[in-house]
Image: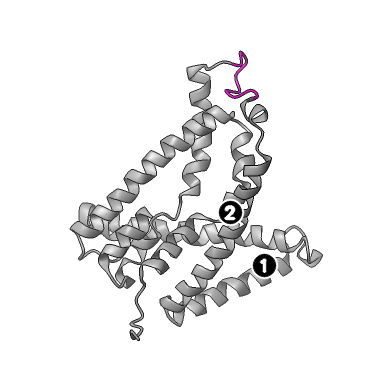
């Protein structure tokens, strides 16, 4: 049996990327996009976003192969390319976005739990703050014990996130109605494709779809912990 070396394999790195991408917002995705765009514009927005994210993933993969000495995350690339000042700003900005994002996740979590435990109110009262703080500190101490064990827990949580998504897809396969999907397909006054109008809708959609892919850099951030350098690029692309 292979001895554990405290490093992250391909599965754990994929779990970090997928787990980071699939946050609370993905479960409200359809509502957020449908508010200001028709099905046609949403499809266009997804296609453009997908192309951009594939290019970004391939860029990360190429960087990990070309510069294996840079293993301190995305900010190490900023430092190598633009100097220590930009590297510091990149790291500082990433850190701020990480913990500020946790505030939103904590509020969403406690508001969801409040459905079953009314003591948490709307997810923003004192009990919600105490409970959310406890959960965040528990995660912190778990990571202090070792990134490998924390990654294992993240993989389990990621699987739990994927189950309702796959269940939803399965239900859609049986409940899908083409006439409803194509009704007001372009969401324009004339009901036909109007370039300026549809592109404006696609732009508003992309504000949502790009946000969904926040976390695609997850494997790169932990590149220094990867068992194999090549796994970092593979995990990002997968």
Q: Splitting the image into 4 quarters, where does residue 137 fall?
A: bottom right
- In the rendered image of this protein, does residue 139 appear above or below residue 205? below
Q: Position of residue 218 (x, y in %)?
A: 40, 60
Q: How many numbered discs sit on the rendered protein?
A: 2
- In the rendered image of this protein, does residue 113 appear above or below residue 138? above
Q: Is residue 208 magenta?
A: no
| Res 88 seen here | no
Tell me which residue sits at (42%, 77%) in the image: 148
* Chief SS of the magenta region: loop
Q: What is the number of the mark on residue 102?
A: none
For label 2, the SS is: helix
Q: Is residue 188 magenta?
A: yes
Mark 2 lies on residue: 166
Position of the N terminus, as image quadrant, is bottom left
Q: Position of residue 139 (x, y in %)?
A: 53, 74
Q: Nearer the viewer, residue 91 or 168?
A: 168
Q: Position of residue 31 (x, y in %)?
A: 64, 40
Relative placement, left or right, of 33 versus 128 is left
């Amino acid at each position: 049996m292979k001895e554990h070396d405290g490093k992250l394999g391909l599965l754990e790195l994929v779990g970090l990327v997928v787990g980071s991408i699939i946050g609370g917002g993905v479960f409200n995705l359809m509502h957020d996009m449908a508010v200001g765009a028709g099905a046609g514009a949403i499809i266009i927005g997804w296609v453009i976003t997908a192309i951009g994210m594939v290019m970004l993933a391939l860029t990360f993969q190429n960087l990990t192969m070309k510069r294996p000495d840079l293993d301190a995350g995305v900010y190490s690339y900023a430092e190598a390319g633009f100097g220590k000042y930009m590297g510091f700003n990149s790291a500082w900005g990433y850190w701020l976005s990480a913990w500020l994002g946790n505030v939103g996740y904590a509020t969403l979590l406690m508001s969801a739990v409040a459905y079953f435990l009314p003591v948490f109110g709307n997810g923003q009262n004192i009990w919600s703050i105490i409970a959310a703080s406890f959960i965040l500190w528990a995660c912190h101490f778990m990571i202090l014990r070792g990134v490998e064990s924390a990654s294992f827990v993240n993989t389990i949580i990621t699987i739990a996130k994927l189950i309702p998504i796959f269940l939803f897809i399965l239900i859609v396969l049986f409940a899908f109605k083409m006439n409803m999907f194509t009704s007001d397909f372009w969401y324009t006054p004339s009901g036909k494709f109007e370039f300026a109008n549809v592109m404006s809708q696609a732009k508003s959609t992309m504000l949502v779809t790009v946000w969904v892919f926040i976390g695609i850099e997850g494997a790169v951030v932990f590149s220094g912990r990867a068992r194999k350098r090549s796994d970092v690029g593979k995990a990002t692309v997968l």
